[in-house]
Amino acid sequence: MTGPAGSDDGGDDAVTHPVGSPPAPRQRNQNPYFFLSYARTPSPMNERGRAGDPNKLVDDFHRELCEHILHLTDHDGQAPPGFMDRQLGVGVEWELNLKKALSVCQVFVPVYTTRFFTREWCGREWDAFARRQAEQRRTRPYTVNAIVPVLWLSPTHLTLPPVVQAVQFAHPDLGEHYLKNGLYGLRKEGRTVRYRRAVWGIAQTIVTVAQQARLDPCDTALFDNLRNVFEEGS
């Protein structure tokens, strides 16, 4: 299942989104443009056991972002242009692979859900990317913030930790319906056109931010003793 089908209402022409495609940043390597940080949703139980995969919509979102970014850039596509931990095979050193991806990706894309801010490793991933940005600002103090949040739910369902509150998430180019409902809400309401426009806008934002920030890779030793920054100051 790819989410509910259905035609959108007639108000889509009023939704604004970025005009044109941002210039494609040329890279000397093919590191991932973004790291998708999210909290997995557990499968509900029914009389036959676990029912379905509640994370499929996040998988679909990741796949759609990757497809857009391949069109917007010169990434060779030999590996996905966006990292997601569900790509990791059985038996791999998952923590090491997470840290490697965080050390080379250009943009950090946290998916805001209620569960996201209660998961220790989501807070550690945020800490890792924040450390990397802080390290770059030692020599390039005007580096732009390379965190691009995604609203999966309406902001009314979210309680943002102090470290998160300073990061802008209300991108007006993504449309008022995205800001009101989040991507999950748009999918579940059958607002397919608005959902697709929001995903397209997020992909363009990722590429633009990657070009502007131009984060240098770092040594994974920078990520020793990561903290769950969502618990600090709460």
Image (cartoon, grey):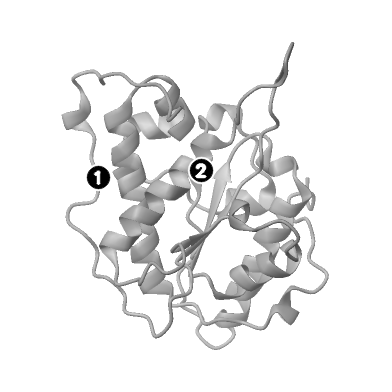
Residue type, label 1: His
- Left or right, 73 with reference to 224: left
Q: Position of residue 107 (x, y in %)?
A: 49, 64
Secondary element at image label 1: loop
Estimate how packed mark 2 is, as few (under 14), some (14 to 19) or many (20 or more) residues with alpha carbons within 10 Å: some
- Left or right, 48 with reference to 111: right
Estimate how packed mark 1 is, as few (under 14), some (14 to 19) or many (20 or more) residues with alpha carbons within 10 Å: some
Q: Position of residue 191 (x, y in %)?
A: 33, 24
Q: Position of residue 84 (x, y in %)?
A: 57, 55
Which residue is at the front of the view, 58 or 18?
58
The residue shown at (73%, 64%) is 92
| Residue 224 shows in the view | yes
Q: Quadrant of residue 137?
A: bottom right
Q: Is residue 65 above or below residue 108?
A: above
Q: Is residue 234 above or below residue 90?
A: above
| Residue 165: image tag | none
- Quadrant including the C terminus: top right
Mark nearer the viewer, 1 or 2: 2
Which residue is at the front of the view, 222 or 41?
41
The single residue placed furthest to the bottom in the displayed view is 139
- Left or right, 217 with reference to 89: left
| Residue 59: image tag | 2
The residue shown at (61%, 74%) is 103
Secondary element at image label 2: helix
Q: Position of residue 94 (x, y in %)?
A: 73, 62
Which residue is at the front of the view, 37 or 19?
37
| Distance between mark 1 and mark 2 Cα atoms | 23 Å
| Between discs 1 and 2, the one toward the N terminus | 1
Q: Is residue 156 above or below residue 223?
A: above
Q: Quadrant of residue 144?
A: bottom left
The residue tagged 1 is 17
The single residue placed furthest to the top in the displayed view is 47
